């Protein structure tokens, strides 16, 4: 009897699968692409997506639509059923939804439609080792109802058509301008976020005033590749998605978390050392890039985080590590290589510029010796990755009011630079007056420039 019963169950499953394929039914968790004839209607806004691997992306939105149709043409052919996100955002009543699109091929343009929405496209990540792609970066953004410069900055990104966008923290300022700002931000960025991947790092405004906003509004809107949990993370929105890492083409990108406690960065450092060691020995990877909210080097309104500086300086012993990008100070600033790593602040996404009451508008006048170029202006950092170098430029955004220390035409290049790959024999000496190797004891050692800042 058990054998007969099992046989019946097998036949039933096969029959169900056969019927499903024939009529377009969706079998949750089957992983089998289905030929879809009917379309379920529904509304969606706040649409954005992230790639979660070489063969998958995750789409998030707010609205009544419950499925995503996708395929290599606008005929689609495959459907993904939405699930409630975790944690659940609370900026409005929603409903909030997300769907994972799987079984994708690398470096292919896919069409998709959410509910009864219009046709949009996304491109999956390329094969490991691929070069010749563009990445944009911005931080400290906000929303168009609170900050008038936000739309023009987002349009610069939309016109650039990058592979993805690194968002360097302080996404919405919902803890300062209200919960409606959270929803408006995710509608403002739809000018690019429906076609370009939104890859975020968290900033202090996402968590440091929990009575007004917290990480549920952000962690609940994203699934991230290789997402990690941080020691000391706030209970609101706990646990996980504090930082993450991913390989794209010939680059390993590693986010760093907010310094919830001193142990947070120590925990991150111990894990990232292994990630960088692996990248050093991976022939498909030519560069390592870190990104986050707080700066390690800054002469702007917010000084560099000294503990973060110590960790990043130590990690610079990895030859492929050449670039760190961050926000927090609302200005643009590029450093000379520090132990081989260039640090760039791009807190220029549209919220108010931070001008100091000094003749140069920066906290330190004149600029410290490590600072190669700085400007108080909105704009977008654009990066182009090749086999042998990273080419970068800072594109002029709208005027920001105040004294606004540079004059430029919207979209023009304010700063241009090239970061070559470091040679195999480039083993830098970490000078004792700049760096203390007793990093586990959390001793903070300042350079002469920082001591005078």
Image (cartoon, helix red, strand yellow):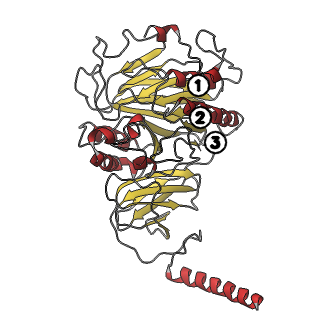
Q: Secondary structure at mark 2?
A: helix
Whether tag 2 and tag 1 are in contact, CB under 8 A, the answer is yes
The disc label shown at residue 129, or none? 3
Residue that appears at 25% across and 37% down: 147
Question: Where residue 378 sits: x, y (%)?
Answer: 32, 30
Q: Nearer the viewer, mark 2 or mark 3?
A: 2
Q: Residues within 10 Å of mark 1 (few under 14, many from 20)?
A: many
Q: Quadrant of the image for the C terminus?
A: top left
Q: Which one is in front, 24 or 100?
A: 100
Any part of residue 255 in sight: yes
Q: CA distance from mark 2 to mark 3?
A: 26 Å
Q: CA distance from mark 3 to mark 1?
A: 27 Å
Q: Which one is in front, 394 or 100?
A: 100
Q: Residues within 10 Å of mark 2 (few under 14, many from 20)?
A: many
Question: Where residue 4 sits: x, y (%)?
Answer: 74, 91
Q: Which one is in front, 86 or 262?
A: 262
- Nearest to N terminus: mark 2 or mark 1: 2
Residue designated by label 1: 311
Residue designated by label 2: 268
Instruction: Left or right? Give the position of 189 relative to 372.
Output: left
Q: Secondary structure at mark 1?
A: helix
Question: Where residue 12 sits: x, y (%)?
Answer: 63, 86
């Amino acid at each position: 009897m058990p054998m007969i019963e099992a046989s019946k169950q097998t036949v039933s499953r096969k029959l169900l699968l056969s019927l499903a394929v024939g009529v377009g039914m969706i079998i949750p968790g089957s992983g089998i692409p289905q030929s879809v004839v009917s379309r379920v209607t529904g509304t969606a806004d706040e649409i954005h997506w992230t790639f979660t691997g070489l063969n998958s992306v995750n789409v998030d939105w707010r609205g009544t639509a419950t499925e995503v149709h996708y395929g290599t043409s606008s005929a689609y052919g495959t459907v993904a059923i939405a699930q409630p996100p975790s944690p659940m955002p609370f900026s409005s009543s929603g409903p909030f939804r997300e769907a994972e699109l799987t079984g994708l091929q690398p470096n292919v343009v896919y069409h998709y439609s959410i509910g009864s929405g219009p046709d949009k496209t996304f491109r999956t990540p390329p094969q490991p080792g691929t070069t010749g792609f563009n990445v944009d970066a911005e931080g400290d953004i906000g929303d168009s109802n609170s900050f008038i410069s936000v739309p023009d900055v987002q349009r610069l990104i939309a016109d650039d058509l990058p592979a993805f966008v690194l968002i360097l923290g302080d996404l919405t300022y919902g803890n300062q301008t209200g919960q409606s700002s959270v929803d408006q931000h995710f509608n403002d960025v739809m000018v690019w976020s429906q076609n370009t991947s939104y890859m975020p790092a968290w900033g202090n405004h996402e968590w440091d005033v929990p009575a007004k906003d917290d990480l549920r509004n952000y962690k609940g809107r994203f699934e991230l590749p290789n997402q990690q949990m941080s020691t000391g993370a706030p209970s609101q929105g706990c646990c996980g998605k504090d930082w993450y890492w991913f390989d794209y083409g010939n680059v390993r990108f590693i986010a760093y978390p907010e310094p919830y406690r001193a142990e947070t960065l120590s925990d991150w450092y111990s894990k990232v050392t292994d990630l960088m060691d692996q990248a050093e020995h991976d022939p498909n990877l030519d560069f390592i890039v870190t990104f986050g909210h707080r700066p390690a080097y800054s002469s702007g309104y917010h000084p560099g985080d000294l503990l973060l500086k110590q960790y990043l300086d130590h990690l610079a012993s990895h030859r492929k590590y050449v670039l760190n990008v961050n926000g927090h100070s609302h200005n643009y600033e590029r450093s000379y290589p520090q132990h081989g790593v260039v640090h760039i602040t791009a807190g220029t996404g549209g919220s108010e510029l931070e001008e100091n009451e000094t003749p140069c508008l920066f906290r330190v006048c004149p600029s410290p010796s490590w600072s190669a170029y700085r400007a108080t202006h909105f704009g977008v950092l654009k990066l182009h990755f090749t086999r042998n170098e990273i080419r970068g430029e800072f594109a002029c955004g709208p005027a920001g009011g105040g004294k606004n220390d540079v004059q430029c035409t919207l979209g023009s290049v304010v700063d241009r630079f090239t970061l070559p790959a470091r040679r195999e024999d480039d083993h830098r000496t970490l000078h004792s007056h700049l760096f203390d190797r007793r990093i586990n004891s959390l001793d903070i050692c300042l350079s002469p420039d920082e001591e005078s800042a």
